[in-house]
Image (cartoon, rainbow, N blue to C red):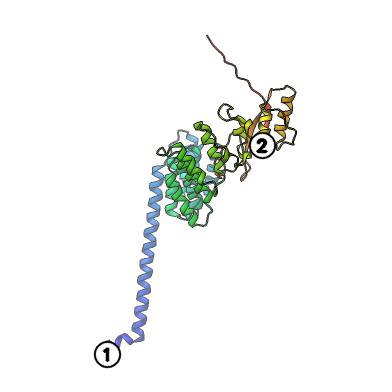
Amino acid sequence: MGSFFIEYRDPMFGLIILFATIFVISFVNYWWGAYKSKEEKDGIEDFIKRFEIVSDEGEFKSLLKDKTIPLESLALLAHGYSKSGDFEKAIGLYLLALERTKHREQKKYILTELGRTYFSAGFLRRSCEVFLDSLKLHPRNEESLKYLSVSYEKLKEYNRAIEVLDSLEELGAQVTKQRDYLKSLSIIYDYKLSNSEKIKKLTSMLETAPFLQRKIFEFWQVTQTEVDLKLFETFDHKKLLDLLWLADQKWFDISTCKAPLLQEISSARGLIEPIKEDNQYFELEVLSNLNSVGYSKASLNFEYICEECKNSFPVHFNRCPSCQAIESANIEPIITKEIYEENISFQ
């Protein structure tokens, strides 16, 4: 029986088998690569057809047909249009650039920028589709995952947004703060929970997410719920400066609270006598002194500066409109002239 397999011990036969195996593997690998490349190309073409932009401007149409324009120039021009708010042209150029490029890294960049353009334009559902298509080609694209999570958040699909954060966390990103923020939103907008249950759940998260203090105070204010003074005393009142300044005295009389900053605000609003101690805010001290001499035409306005990107905004934000950072608003008071509204009747 052993003599029957004698030819299998021949070195030449072993070499033939080895080279045959290498050839078969190489052949299969080549055709598999070609198949995946064609599948990716067909996917890009289908994607472009789904999002094709039709423009009525002849000059822009001719620009799209000009194949001599370098890909880098198209991407730069699209970025400029996006920054200036001309999103339709930016989208058209990104789609054209996507159609021309054959490099995976370039496709990754263009798809990400296209998704961000749709996001900036307010087409949140479409931006989600673009980011998902981007992730099919590049599953480890952190920028696409980040904006996909924010898009789901703005669509109030909080569970999906949290699932995306799980993927980001697998890539090494720090997402604890974002996850707590999304959980707080899901609690606030859960119609099945009563107001007291919502407050209880939010309060239980304060130890790991102290930035939710503002959320709780805003919830009290919006629902006109009685403030839990014992809990409120533990808050960082600087983070509530604008809310406390504008708080309705009938709902919450801040002058009864003995916290130093609340006494300063009360004095600046003219609710109590001026305090002699140094104020934490120069603006509050000025207003307090003005009230003491009978001048009541000054007030406070507020500017909100992102601690991450340093951009400033006229209204408070939970997520920075520029860099998407969570609870990064630094509140800066500004002394302004009081504006009195007059009821005007046309009768």
Height in image: 66 above or below 224?
A: below
Height in image: 41 above or below 214?
A: below
Residue 16 is marked as none
Task: Depth check: give the residue in front, 166 or 65.
Answer: 166
Task: Depth check: give the residue in front, 232 or 77.
Answer: 232
In the rendering, at what x and y percent does residue 31 appear? 36, 63
Q: Choose mark 1 or mark 2, whichever is in front.
A: 2
The residue labelled by disc 1 is 2
Task: Depth check: give the residue in front, 103 or 236.
Answer: 236
In the rendering, at what x and y percent does residue 17 appear? 34, 79
Q: Amino acid at mark 2?
A: Leu
| Quadrant occupied by the N terminus | bottom left
Name the residue at the top extreme: 347
The residue labelled by disc 2 is 261
**Which residue appears at 71% of the width and 25% of the height?**
291
How far apart, in angstroms, are the residues tagged by discs 1 and 2?
97 Å
Q: Amino acid at mark 1?
A: Gly
**Which residue appears at 45% of the width and 35% of the height?**
55
In the rendering, at what x and y percent does residue 286 appear? 73, 30
**Which residue appears at 43% of the width and 43% of the height?**
157
The answer to whether one can see residue 154 in this image is: no
The answer to whether one can see residue 198 in this image is: yes
Task: Depth check: give the residue in front, 212 or 84.
Answer: 212
Instruction: Determine the secondary structure under disc 1.
Output: helix
Q: Quadrant of residue 280?
A: top right
Mark 1 or 2, nearer chain start: 1
Instruction: Determine the secondary structure under disc 2.
Output: helix
Dot 2, how many residues are within 10 Å of its Cα: few (below 14), some (14-19), or many (20+)? some
In the rendering, at what x and y percent does residue 229 appear? 57, 37
Left of 160 or right of it: where is 322? right
